[in-house]
Image (cartoon, rainbow, N blue to C red):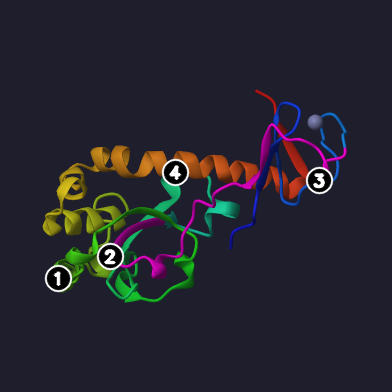
Amino acid sequence: MDPGIICFQHCGPKVFCMNLTEKCPTCEEDLSEAKFLLMPFRVPYPFVRASQYPCAVVIKPTVGDFLNDYYNSMDLHIGVTNSSGLIVEFDKHGLRRHKSKEWDQCLLLDQVDTPWREHWDNVLTTFCKDSCWTAKDYDEDAHNCYSFVLCFLCALDYGTLSTAAANRSLFCEQFIVGRTTSAGKYISLFRKLKERCFYVHKE
Ligand SMILES: [Zn+2]
């Protein structure tokens, strides 16, 4: 999934590319024996496969994926995983607990420590039995995926995650904005490199 964006600095500006260029795009020096200001390294891929993160809170675009389709924070859909890595999500289809490829490129907002996993599953199971999470109850603004996840996190009673969950905007500030902002930088690099071999970042 990781497209493998590489970053290096040879004579000045940061250069980003998918495959290391032969010559420095800035000064044209052959890079095979060149000295770098910053040795080439792989830019950390910000996304995860939800199924590999049990008992976690995850977010993804409502439609499509981050790298190709994400446009702004309005398009986001939030869900949680249980201890076996199954996705539990609430949307217009109602409540679903399943394995889904659609969650193979998402942002990890938080994950509880291992000793808490049994508690997480118990609260989640009880919470899912609540009758207010059917397709009929769904409302795009007032009773949506955020309502489901935030109510569950409050019921969980797990430190700052639950405290923040009591308030939509506080939760967004503490757990979402930072992640989507840094993912946004990666996405913008990826899209630049879809059109050309390298991108020189001039400060
Ligand atoms: Zn150079």
**Foreground disc of the pair 2, 1:** 2
Residue in the picture at 30% in, 61% down: 56
Compared to residue 12, the image places residue 88 above or below, namely below
Quadrant (top left/top right/bottom left/bottom right) for the N terminus = bottom right
Q: Along the polypeptide, which appears first: circle 3 or circle 2?
A: 3
Reading the image, the residue beneath label 1 is: 131
In the shown orientation, is residue 152 left or right of residue 109?
left
Residue in the picture at 41% in, 51% down: 76
**Foreground disc of the pair 3, 4:** 3
Q: Secondary structure at mark 2?
A: loop
In the shown orientation, is residue 67 left or right of residue 144?
right
Q: Along the polypeptide, which appears first: circle 3 or circle 1?
A: 3
Q: Secondary structure at mark 3?
A: loop
Reading the image, the residue beneath label 3 is: 21
Cα–Cα span, label 3 and label 1: 58 Å
Q: Local crowd at mark 4 within 10 Å, few (<14), some, or many (≥20)?
A: many
Cα–Cα span, label 3 and label 2: 41 Å
CB atoms of marks 1 and 4 within 8 Å: no
State the mark number for residue 191: none
Q: Amino acid at mark 1?
A: Ser
**Foreground disc of the pair 4, 2:** 2
**Foreground disc of the pair 3, 2:** 3
User: What segment carries the magenta color?
Assistant: 30-59
Q: Quadrant of residue 78?
A: bottom left
In the shown orientation, is residue 74 left or right of residue 169?
right
Q: Along the polypeptide, which appears first: circle 3 or circle 4?
A: 3
Instruction: Give yes or no for residue 33 being in the magenta stretch.
Output: yes
State the mark number for residue 180: 4
Q: Amino acid at mark 2?
A: Cys
Classify mark 2 as within 8 Å of ligand 1 or not, answering yes or no.
no
Classify mark 3 as within 8 Å of ligand 1 or not, answering yes or no.
no
Q: Amino acid at mark 4?
A: Thr
